Amino acid sequence: MQRKLILASPLLEITISRLCQELIENHQDFTDSVILGLQPRGILFAERIHQELLKATGVNIPLGRLDATFYRDDYRRRDPVSPNATKVPFLIEGKKVILVDDVLATGRMVRAALDAMTAFGRPEKVELCVLIDRIYSRDLPINPDYIGKKVNTLETEKVLVEWKEQGHDEDRIWLIPVK
Amino acid sequence: MLSTRHLLGIKDLTLEDIELIMKTAQEFKDVLNRPIKKVPSLRDVTIANVFFENSTRTRLSFELAEKRLSADTINFSASGSSVKKGETLLDTVNNILAMKVDMIVMRHASPGAPHFLSKHIKANIVNAGDGTHEHPTQALLDSFSMREKLGDLAGKKIAIIGDILHSRVALSNIFALQKQGAEITLCGPTTLIPRHITELGVKVSHNVKETLKWCDVANVLRIQLERQQIKYFPSLREYSLYFGISKQMLDELDKEIVLMHPGPINRGVELTSDAADSHHSIILDQVENGVAVRMAVLYLLAAQN
């Protein structure tokens, strides 16, 4: 099976800017809003959203990186995932948290992230923003509030996100077969 | 993933294992600096702390590490147990394991006790000190603390000063530091340096001042009077005169060195009080890092079932 391109420039930029417009619609001046990128792969997407919102609104929204490895419920049941740095240099007590990840599939990582977040306070509200939503792959009742693109995938497929920041020529999102 | 199911000694670890433990420990150190210091990673794991020898720091540190990982813990100490009635080590441990325990953290006075156990039981074993042999988690936390101060340890000069003969900390540190590419000099009276230790590729010195001038880190060990059945030196006063380290000696050096001690300190013997409490000393950082490093070890070993 070949890899299949599912999203690339210029549609990708349009998608990101549409997500930002939706965020602006709901958060307006972003008082009390914070962005949390989910480690490891949600970070670059969270940074894009952050930059785009800075350009559009002039507001520098606090941006953190959250690693939920230690909170996963499948530890010891599959190959261990090595942890990444958590950098949340602010308290999320009473804040509106925008949780950002690149791909949403089973929802287990998001569940773990909701758990991990409580170490930094009790947020007033948590919203989920994903670039790719793998519909019909969910193990848990978790749904995103902001969706870049919905993709119907098989279990034998995987979504691969490539960013320029990682050294790729273009931002591209692929659907690839899993061996 | 670690290359081993048990942490019996540093000797069995690869450099990749050490790097993985260091990286994981760094993330746990972050966790420990948060308002809520607990993660749920090991909530389905039960750990028994089996201590056949006295301990304050190590035992508290392991217990705290286990609690921060949400593991269930039970504690066992030899005094006041059936060991006094003549139960064997294997029987004692098998009885503990029959209560559905997943991991054993053990300290024992006999070198090799955890290695023996690892051949007979299924649970993961962490050696918390076996006689005068190894104390792997202490060496790992020492390396972690040195790396915080100095960065990469390759080519760094580390002195281990004091009672090398009776020290499990020394042997584990030698293995750990050599794997990370550091140079090592052991310093102490001839009677407290094991014969043939230079076979391991370490240098030996009997001059503390020279050693301090040479090193980037001085890891000072305790004189273990409880293990010394014969006199290895005339008196504690004479030992401290020749091998004790004072703040003045550290201040006279033309560079900053890092002073470490695994504890408990015999103040006035191997270190004077002003040296132990000086800005050179990272003794309390070592204790702090101990919890994070032990969390990393337990976390990584728990995945090995």
Image (tube, coloured by chain):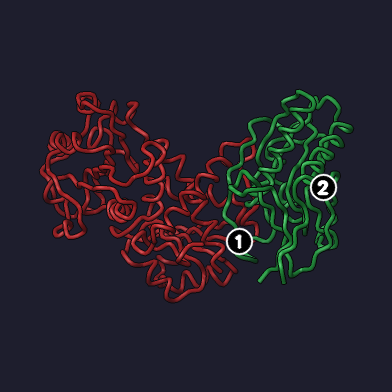
In the image: residue B95, left or right of residue B263: right
Identify by letter the chain in green: A
Q: Are marks 1 and 2 on the same chain?
A: no
B165, B178: nearer the viewer: B178
Parent chain of label 1? B
Label 1: element kind: loop
In the image: residue B143, left or right of residue A52: left
List the single residue furthest toward the bottom. B120
Q: Residue at x 61, y 49 (%)?
A: A168
Q: Nearer the viewer, mark 1 or mark 2?
A: 2
> Which residue does the numbered mark 2 point to in the structure image?
A148
Residue A37, image x, y percentages: 69, 42
Q: Residue at x 43, y 62 (%)?
A: B7
Q: Residue at x 46, y 70 (%)?
A: B92
Residue type indicated by callout 2: Gly
Residue A102, image x, y percentages: 73, 49
In the image: residue A156, left or right of residue B67: right
- Count the marks: how many? 2
Residue type indicated by callout 1: Val
Residue B122, disc: none
Parent chain of label 2? A
B134, B60: nearer the viewer: B134
Residue A156, image x, y percentages: 74, 70
| Quadrant in the picture for residue B111 | bottom left
B42, B29: nearer the viewer: B29
Q: Where, quadrant-wise, is the C terminus of chain B in this rendering?
A: bottom right
List the single residue furthest toward the right. A25
Q: Is residue A137 above or below residue A20?
A: below
> Which residue does the numbered mark 1 point to in the structure image?
B45
Spatial CA span between label 1 and label 2: 39 Å
Query: Which tint is chain B?
Result: red
